[in-house]
Amino acid sequence: MADMQAPFKEKVRRVLTSVNPNGKSFVMADGEPEDILILNGCRMVRLWQTNDVPTTVPATSDPTVQGLGRLPADFSGTRFYTAELPPGVKIPLHQGDTVDYIAVIKGQLTLGLETGETLLNPGDVVVQTGNMHAWENRGAAPVLIMVCVVGAKRRA
């Protein structure tokens, strides 16, 4: 895993809580998750996932040990992850049958749409609703975003 992280700078500490056999809340995991994927030149760290909405609580295990991978065609759950986009990264136009909540944490990110572009800064939030979109880091510093993807059904 070390060589996958070499060009990337951001570390994420995730504190995962649940309920122990005695019915008391506790910390199940604390540290950087091991589920890391390099995709389109970006480092993605999966923080959590559910396979369906609604899901069942409390958690009995950490689902992020299964491997991030791509979303299945019939995706009906959630994925929560960070993505670090190094300078110069361009992700071409794409879309999915999802609602994506994206928050810019560090850096400047250009959101490309079929009708134009929008520059995003730290603190900005984007809600994608199954539309075509692209990403580009035109700056000199890495961009860090947090993303929550929710499965959706496309209108006919």
Image (cartoon, rainbow, N blue to C red):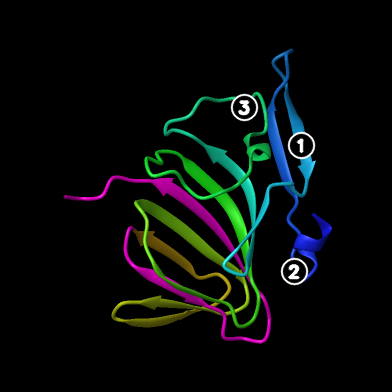
The residue type indicated by label 3 comes to Ala
**N-terminal of the two: label 3 or label 2?**
2
Residue 136 position within the rendered picture, expressed as x and y whole percent measured from the top left:
52, 78
Which sits in the foreground, 56 or 95? Answer: 95
Labelled disc at residue 140: none
Q: Which residue is mark 2?
A: 8
> Which residue, given by chain and number where applicable, does mark 3 sit on?
59
Residue at 48%, 29% in the rendered image: 55
Q: Amino acid at mark 1?
A: Ala
Q: Residues within 10 Å of mark 3 (few under 14, many from 20)?
A: some
Which range of residues does the magenta coloring cover? Answer: 130-156
Q: Nearer the viewer, mark 2 or mark 1?
A: 2
- Was residue 86 drawn as part of the magenta stretch in this picture? no
Amino acid carrying label 2: it is Phe
Closer to the camera: disc 3 or disc 2?
2
Label 2 element class: loop
Q: Residue at x 79, y 41 (%)?
A: 30
Residues packed near mark 2 inside 10 Å, few (<14), some (14 to 19) or many (20 plus): some
Q: Which residue is mark 1?
A: 29
Seen in the picture, residue 78 relative to 95 is either above or below; the reply is above
Q: Is residue 28 left or right of residue 39?
A: right
Residues under labels 2 and 1: Cα distance?
23 Å
Dot 1 alpha-carbon crowd within 10 angstroms: few under 14, some 14 to 19, many 20 or more: some
Query: Residue 145's x, y, as percent?
Result: 58, 65
Q: In the rendered image, which quarter is residue 107 located in?
A: bottom right
Q: Quadrant of the N terminus?
A: bottom right
Which of the two labelled residues, at mark 1 and mark 3, occupies the earlier sequence position? Answer: 1
**Does residue 57 lie above or below 76 as drawn?**
above
Total numbered circles: 3
Mark before the other along the chain sequence, 2 or 1 = 2
